Amino acid sequence: MKSISLLLLRFAGIFGMIGAFMGAHMAGSQGEAYALRPIHAHVLVVGWLSLFAWSAFYQLFETRFTKLAYTHAITGILGTTGLTSGMWLYMVKPFEVSEGFTFIFYIGGGSLLLLSFALFLVLTFLVQPKRA
């Protein structure tokens, strides 16, 4: 489970850096950059905070269900990436991509993330504290 924990920790760090950069950009540029607020919030709460909390979870608890744990971690990372980047594409419209594609990307990422939270809930009933 250490590899899952480390994977989640590294992605939490990536999302934390992206969120901090977005916050600095919004504070420095004011005006239009405030349109990034909901994206910034999701990057930090789901990307940084949730992935970090899950990383700590795998350090504190052990499970025999490693495939389920890996599925949880991968759906969490992909879902967070899809949700936040899809949200950015949908709300900011930085490229000329069809609105249907960006909406599906956004909703697909959110759905994967929702699956990840459901898997986490299941895992909380299948773990035991690690022995010292």
Image (spheres, rainbow, N blue to C red):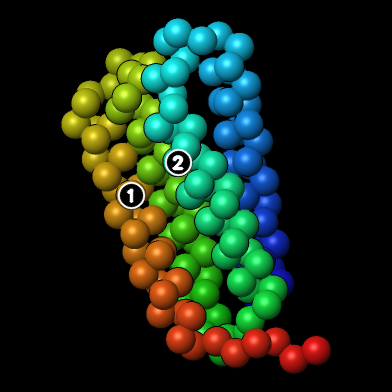
Quick one: label 1, few (<14), some, or many (20+) residues within 10 Å? many
In the image, 114: left or right of 26? Answer: left
Q: Toward the viewer: 93 or 128?
A: 128
User: Where, quadrant-wise, is the C terminus in this rendering?
Assistant: bottom right
Question: Residue 110: percent from the left, percent from the top?
Answer: 33, 49
- Viewer-side residue, 110 vs 71: 110
Q: Quadrant of residue 19?
A: top right
Query: Residue 131 at x, y = what percent?
Result: 74, 91
In this view, the residue farthest toward the right is: 132
Residue located at (62% from left, 50% from top): 12
At label 1, the amino acid type is Gly
Element carrying mark 1: helix
Residue at 51 percent across and 10 percent down: it is: 30
Q: Is residue 45 left or right of residue 61?
A: left
Q: Is residue 67 visible?
A: no
Q: Crowdedness of circle 2 by 10 Å Cα count: few (<14), some, many (20+)?
A: some
The mark found on residue 42 in the picture is 2
In the image, residue 21 sits, relative to residue 78, either above or below, namely above
In the figure, is residue 9 to the left or right of 68?
A: right
Marks 2/1: CA–CA distance: 11 Å
Name the residue tied to disc 1.
110
Tell me where residue 129 appears, x and y as whole percent: 65, 87
Q: Nearer the viewer, mark 2 or mark 1?
A: 2
Mark identifier at residue 11: none
Which numbered disc, 2 or 1, marks the residue that appears first in the sequence? Answer: 2
Residue 92 percent location from the top left of the image: 36, 20
